[in-house]
Amino acid sequence: MNTNATTMNKDKPRKNWLVMFIHKMGSPPWFYNFSGKLIPWLWAIFIALTVWGLYLGLVKAPADYQQGESFRIMYLHVPSAWMSMMIYTTMAIMGFIALVWRIRIMEIMAMCSAPVGAAFTIVALASGSLWGRPTWGTYWVWDARLTSELVLLFLYLGVIGLYNAIDEPRKAARAACLLALVGAVNLPIIHYSVKWWNTLHQGSSISVTGGNNIDPSMLWPLLIMALAVKFYYGANLLTRSRVKLLEQDKRKGWVKNIIKEGES
Amino acid sequence: MNHAPFIWAAYSIGTVVLVWCALAPLIRKKAVIRDIRKLSQIEERNRDSHS
């Protein structure tokens, strides 16, 4: 009994801290100030990791024995493709939370994720196409992986378009969050397309459960780049969310105070 | 086949898209702050004319 009581007492301050943090994140002025302090760090880590990852990938890693130098496109293509799916998943989860609990910050963050996700999808499609030409002999084929990734881009554009088509921002966000949730059905299709159908696109070379087919000298730069783009997403998302908050709350006192104080 | 043009093109497109995606909210922020300043000035002017 005594041991349980001690454990509960130890957990209580931690739980309170977490609950307090979540509550505070729901407050626009607190979110604005907190994210403002976080953003420069996220950009700095992104830049440092990108420089390191690209140096290892473009300078240090040896050429592939089959694909030659063109495999170096992997350090842009693969992290972008992973991000296109990860951001959509995050957007759908935030959209679900926004729809169920009506948290405005979540609506804003879900909607601000869409342009970043669309940018990564464009980069994944363009870099994949440029990798395909020397590897497969063609820029584009209508195989399941490429087509489902293109559908993902259209879903992002649909969410952005729907959000901008409705004047009332909260109503617009709810409609777009619903579309984001419905579109999430495309995610398993993209992921399993190389297994379900016979595609020109290769299967996964990296597995979370092990059995990687890539040499460590080529794998590490890829993992560093994959980590770097996550910091890019974090910094970009928070920057966009802060601007959206200013825009929506432009008649409120806290925004006027920030502008008066000359905070940018 | 020389692979360099494909690698350069891929990284150039990636850089342009991601830099634009990072700069767009900063450009938007400037416009929003300008709007808020204008709005505040109009509100102050209206308050002065009423008092």
Image (cartoon, rainbow, N blue to C red):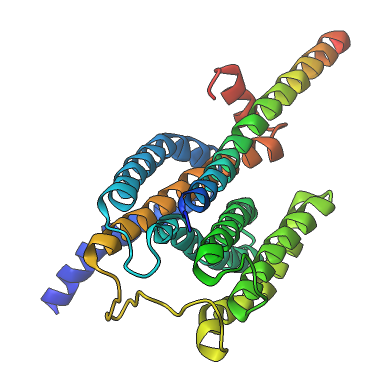
Query: Hey, which quadrant is residue A95 in on the image?
Result: bottom right
A184 left or right of A78?
right
- Residue A86 screen position, x and y as percent: 50, 65
* A130 or A85: nearer the viewer: A130
Question: Residue at (37%, 40%) from the top-left corner?
Answer: A47
Quarter of the rendering occupied by the N terminus of chain A:
bottom left
Is residue A27 visible in this depiction of the protein? no
Q: Position of residue A36 (x, y in %)?
A: 47, 35
Q: Quadrant of residue A146?
A: bottom right
Q: Is residue B17 above or below residue A214?
A: above
Q: Position of residue A133 (x, y in %)?
A: 56, 64
Instruction: Look at the picture and state if A239 lies above or below A164.
Output: above
Left or right of A85 on screen, residue B50:
right
Q: Position of residue A163 (x, y in %)?
A: 76, 55
In the foreground, A193 or A90: A193
Q: Quadrant of residue A69?
A: bottom left
**Above or below: residue A191 compared with residue B44:** below
Above-or-below relation of B4 to A188:
above
The residue drawn where x is 63% and y is 53% is A104
Asked if residue A224 shows in the view, the reply is: yes
Quarter holding the C terminus of chain A is top right
